[in-house]
Image (cartoon, rainbow, N blue to C red):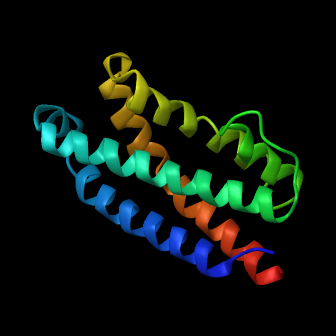
Amino acid sequence: MLDRKFIEGKISLIEEYFYEMEDVVKFGEKEILKDNMKLRALERDFQLIVDEMIDINLHFIRELDLKSPDDFQNTFSILAASNIIPDDFAEKLAPVVGTRNILVHRYEKVDKKLFISQVKNERKDFLEYLKLINQYLKKT
């Protein structure tokens, strides 16, 4: 059985991290790159958002007795296969796990300009994810 309080707590955290991230992305790429505090804050908020999304995905998979994922990226396609999120959106969103892994495990390989650009252009996907999770919760 889905633990709504658990999921709602994760959603609140994602929203909190998202709005912290918004405070940074309002600056231009050059300003973020020259200010390590801004860059690190952006990276950390991104990581925390993805971590919370993975926790939500794993909770759905465990509690709804869905197929076990091969990796964290695969959790999005499992939710899509169960009609929790759309297939095309799962495909679009799943690579955030790879970006998170590079930030955490292979930091020296991060293309900082590309990272900032991707966050600036695709961060609204995090809000769309929350909307879809909330819609599913309302249906059940």
The quarter of the rendered structure image containing the C terminus is: bottom right
How far from the left and from the top, in percent, is residue 90? 72, 46
Q: Residue at x 82, y 81 (%)?
A: 139
Between 78 and 91, the one nearer to me in the picture: 78
Q: Is residue 75 left or right of residue 31?
A: right
How far from the left and from the top, in percent, is residue 95? 60, 34
Between 50 and 23, the one nearer to me in the picture: 50
Q: Is residue 97 left or right of residue 92?
A: left
The answer to whether one can see residue 110 in this image is yes
Q: Residue at x 71, y 48 (%)?
A: 89
The answer to whether one can see residue 85 in this image is no
Does residue 61 lie above or below 112 as drawn?
A: below
Does residue 81 lie above or below 108 as drawn?
A: below
How far from the left and from the top, in percent, is residue 37? 14, 44
Q: Residue at x 57, y 77 (%)?
A: 8
Q: Residue furthest top?
A: 109
Q: Is residue 27 left or right of residue 65?
A: left
